[in-house]
């Protein structure tokens, strides 16, 4: 700067945001989800809670927004008729206006992570946490804490993103899809299960010497795949009686998701014949398997189970 600029004397004025001219070139960008959150916050507040800076270009007869372009745009999207702005009436050169714009974008200060985290944890309501615009990544929780220590954050909710390598993606998708087979209810995990889940992940991380959560989860799914028959505890009592009449996966009975093709062909032929003779309903091939198993255990007088 060749000379000291005159001291600015801005004033506050209430204006219709639609009458303001936005910057043609704005270095500050905002992702769509951030802008949508800003609009939602303004709509909830019914006003702007921070004041945009506007330059009154008296020569050309318009007011240009130097700082707060996204807030002005969001206030229009939120259908506000009036907003408060800080107006500079003094003449500003183009270089002054650009320098002022850049300074407002760059001089933002820094947050102390510990203080930020402490304040964030005082927000008990999910909506207010969303309103704050912060998440675990902003608080640097995921980058600085080991898996077994995540429970110390005591967050009421968390967003988990799993990233699989191409070679692992198909196997993971198949395992997760098969886990949903037969499930027609919505379930909510108990908070008491949160720490055991993290402990299991931490143990898997250590045992396999991996740092990726998706890789650890893949290892856990592989272990579960090898112990499918352990799922019988969910529908079989210690005395050997059924605990419910719902449907269960055949893999929990056979201990495998596949069987040799010749065996499958033989079973299919037997089921087709039994259906053709009217001994079992179509689509209920399992009844033949149950009848054969029952006769093997207790003779031909075995009473078949009813479909749940």
Image: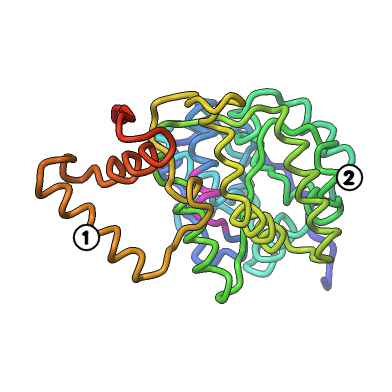
Q: Nearer the viewer, residue 218 or 73?
A: 218
Identify the residue at horizontal 48%, vertical 51% (top origin). 254
State how the image is colored. rainbow
Q: Is residue 308 visible?
A: no
Quadrant in the rendering for residue 11: top right
Callout 2 secondary element? loop
Measuring 21% from the left and 60% from the top, which residue is drawn there? 269
* Marking on residue 112: 2
- Secondary structure of the residue carrying tag 1 is helix
Q: Residue at x 45, y 46 (%)?
A: 180
Q: Position of residue 201 (x, y in %)?
A: 76, 50
Ranked by sequence position, the earlier of labels 1 and 2 is: 2
Q: Is residue 12 above or below residue 226?
A: above
The answer to whether 91 appears left or right of 109 in the picture is left
| 99 or 45: nearer the viewer | 45
Single out the residue that lies furthest toward the left.
277
For the magenta stretch, what is the residue range? 30-36
Of the pair 172 and 43, the residue shown nearer to us: 172
Residue 197 position (above or below residue 239)? below
Q: Main secondary structure of the magenta part?
A: helix
Q: Residues within 10 Å of mark 1 (few under 14, many from 20)?
A: few
Residue 32 location (% of width, % of height): 49, 54
Whether residue 63 sits left or right of residue 96 in the image: it is left
Quadrant of the frame with the C terminus: top left
Quadrant of residue 120 in the image?
top right
Disc 1 vs disc 2: which is toward the camera? 1
Q: Quadrant of residue 299?
A: top left
Residue matched to label 1:
269
Q: Is residue 27 magenta?
A: no
**Mark 1 and mark 2 residues within 8 Å of each other at the beta carbon:** no
Whether 230 is drawn above or below 272: the answer is: above
Label 1 – label 2 distance at C-alpha: 71 Å
């Amino acid at each position: 700067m060749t000379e000291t600029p005159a001291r600015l004397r801005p004033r506050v004025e209430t204006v219709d945001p639609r009458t303001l001219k936005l910057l043609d070139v704005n270095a500050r960008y905002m992702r769509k989800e951030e802008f949508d959150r800003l609009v939602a916050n303004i709509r909830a507040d019914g006003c702007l809670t921070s004041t945009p800076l506007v330059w009154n270009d008296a020569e050309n007869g318009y007011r240009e927004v130097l700082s707060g372009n996204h807030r002005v745009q969001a206030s229009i999207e939120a259908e506000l008729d009036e907003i408060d702005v800080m107006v500079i009436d003094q003449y500003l050169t183009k270089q002054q206006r650009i320098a002022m714009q850049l300074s407002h974008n760059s001089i933002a200060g820094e947050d102390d992570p510990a203080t930020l985290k402490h304040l964030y944890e005082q927000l008990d309501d999910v909506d207010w946490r969303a309103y704050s615009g912060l998440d675990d990544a902003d608080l640097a929780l995921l980058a600085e804490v080991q898996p077994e220590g995540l429970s110390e954050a005591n967050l009421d909710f968390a967003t988990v993103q799993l990233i699989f390598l191409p070679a692992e993606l198909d196997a993971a998708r198949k395992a997760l899809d098969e886990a949903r087979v037969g499930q027609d209810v919505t379930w909510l995990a108990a908070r008491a299960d949160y720490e055991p889940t993290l402990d299991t992940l931490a143990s898997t991380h250590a045992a396999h010497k991996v740092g990726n959560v998706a890789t650890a989860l893949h290892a856990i799914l592989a272990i579960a795949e090898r112990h499918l028959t352990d799922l019988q505890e969910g529908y079989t009592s210690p005395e050997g009686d059924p605990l419910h009449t719902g449907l269960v996966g055949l893999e929990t009975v056979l201990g495998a998701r596949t069987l040799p093709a010749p065996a499958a062909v033989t079973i299919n032929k037997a089921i087709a014949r039994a259906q053709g003779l009217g001994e079992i309903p179509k689509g209920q091939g399992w009844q033949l398997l149950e009848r054969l198993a029952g006769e093997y255990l207790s003779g031909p007088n075995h009473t078949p189970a009813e479909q749940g």
